[in-house]
Every structure is written in structure tokens, then in C-alpha cells.
Amino acid sequence: MSRIFLTLGAINAFLCVAFGAFGAHGLKQRLSVDMLAVYQTGVQYHFYHALGLIAVGLVLLHLPKSRLIVLSGWLMLAGIVLFSVSLYALSLSGLRGLGMITPFGGVAFLSAWALLAYGVWAAK
């Protein structure tokens, strides 16, 4: 599992750089200031959690049997999709209803970090 989360983290970090550059150079003239800020928030949290996926992969090198750590990684990935991707879609489409998805991603992020902390603490 460690290899899976290290790979997912690296792929997502790559995507963050690409999406960030696209936002800074390709969307600056196309989006309103408010929508560009929404997009950049998506990139920012995406990047934090790409690093989180890498952290999960590294922790799993030391605690390979921890189901809590594995669940933490899957929740981080779900958070990226629900939080960041919903913000990308909202900013690019202008469909405000997509903002209703974003809080579920935030809950996934919070749950992921809590499980990571508890999983490390509870490890034997």
C-alpha cells in the first residue's frame, strides 16, 4: 500500500503544479478575481493533500498493517476529488450548486488527518 500512496501523492503533486500554472497563466484573463481565488483555493488544498498522500505512504513503510493509516490515505484522495475538483469545476463552469459538494471534501480531509494521527498514536 505504501507504494500506491507514494505514487498517488507524486501524481497529485504533478497535477497541482500543472493546474496551478494553468490557473496563473491560462485563466487569469478568463476568470473573475473571485472565481480565480476559488480555483487557487482548490490548487492550494490539492497540494497540501498530495503531500499528505506522500506522508501516508511514508508512514505505511513503518506501519504496513495499519488499516487506519490506509483509510486515512483513501480519505485524503476522496477529499481531493470532492473538495479541490469541485472548486475547479465551480470556478470554470460558474455553477454555484457545485459548491454543495465541497464541504464533504473538507470533512474527508479532516477525517483523514484525524485518522492519520490516531493511527500513528495507536500503533503497536
Image (spheres, helix red, strand yellow):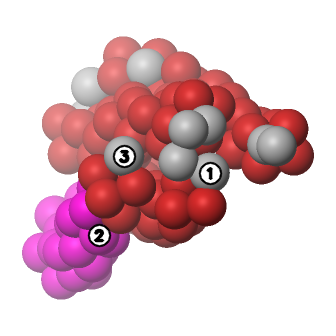
The residue under label 3 is 1
**In the rendered structure, which disc, 3 or 1, sits on the residue that comes first in sequence?**
3
Question: Mark 2 sits on what residue?
Answer: 10
Disc 1 residue type (three-letter): Leu
Q: Do the residues labelled 1 and 2 touch (CB within 8 Å)?
A: no
Query: In terms of image quadrants, where is residue 46?
Result: bottom left
Q: Nearer the viewer, mark 3 or mark 2?
A: 3
Q: Pick whichever of labels 3 and 2 is earlier in the sequence.
A: 3
Q: Residue at x 43, y 20 (%)?
A: 101
Q: How far apart are marks 3 and 2 (CA)?
A: 14 Å
**Residue at the image point whose x is 35% and y is 63% from the top:** 6
> For the residue carrying disc 2, how many other residues have a C-alpha within 10 Å: few (<14), some (14-19), or many (20+)?
some
The image quarter in which residue 62 lies: bottom right
Q: In this view, does 24 lie above or below 58?
A: below
Q: What is the three-letter code of the residue carrying label 2?
A: Ala
Residue 34 appears in view: no
Is residue 31 in view from this perspective? yes
Q: In this view, does 71 lie to the left or right of 17?
A: right
N-term-proximal mark, 1 vs 2: 2
Callout 1 secondary element? loop
Q: Give the range drawn in magenta.
A: 7-31
